[in-house]
Amino acid sequence: MAENKTRANGASVRAYLDAIPDAARRQDCEAIVAMMSRVTGAPPVMWGGSIVGFDSYHYKYASGREGDAPLAGFSSRKGDISIYLSCEVPPTDALRERLGRHKMGKACLYVRRLEDVDAHVLEQLVAEAAAATRARYPA
């Protein structure tokens, strides 16, 4: 079975953040680093070349596929900041309704700027996703 391409590595989170050309986006990403560190109790680590992850868990699916993934994470993409949540438990609609301007994929929340969303609700969404993932995949 093929190994995951995206794995934790020793690349510099600081260098990744410093390379974000837009100052406002860089500041948003630094705020997300602080929030996710608080929520997970873990320092940021680069996963692949563009994902900042916090803590990790090991998953194993019924198909036999298994691997490691960050418990919480984000990436500054071209248009939005992608915030990676648990794909096992989608965020509650009630929380998402209070979040503000965003888009939602299966396991990814997309925000343009942090000023577009309620930071407390975002933190709650990340905390709930991390707790659900820890419960499903205990260490």
Image: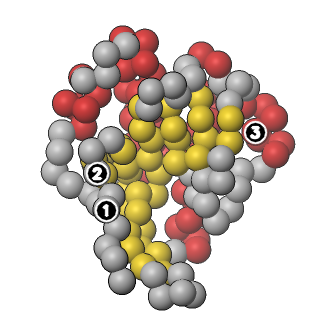
Q: Which x, y percent locates residue 87?
A: 61, 60
Q: In the rendered view, tell whether residue 5 sits above or below residue 107.
A: below
49 vs 135, left or right, is: left
Q: In the rendered structure, which disc, 1 or 2, sits on the residue that comes first in sequence?
A: 1
94 vs 112, left or right, is: right
Give the farthest residue toward the top. 23
The image quadrant where one finds the N terminus is: bottom left
Q: In the rendered view, tell whether residue 93 sits above or below residue 111.
A: below
Residue at 59 percent across and 16 percent down: it is: 115
| Residue, disc 1 | 5
The image quadrant where one finds the C terminus is: bottom left
111 vs 78, left or right, is: right
Quadrant position of residue 56 = bottom left
| Residue, disc 2 | 48
Q: Which x, y percent locates residue 5?
A: 31, 62
| Residue, disc 3 | 96
Disc 3 marks which amino acid?
Arg
What is the spatial separation of the Cα atoms under label 3 and label 2, in whole angstroms?
A: 28 Å
Disc 1 marks which amino acid?
Lys
Q: In the rendered structure, which disc, 1 or 3, sits on the residue that comes first in sequence?
A: 1
What is the spatial separation of the Cα atoms under label 1 and label 2, in whole angstroms?
A: 7 Å
Quadrant position of residue 116 = top right
Q: In the rendered view, tell whether residue 112 sits above or below residue 14.
A: above
Q: Which x, y percent locates residue 133?
A: 56, 65
Disc 2 marks which amino acid?
Gly
Evaluate whether residue 33 shows in this view. Answer: yes
What is the spatial separation of the Cα atoms under label 1 and label 3, in whole angstroms?
A: 30 Å
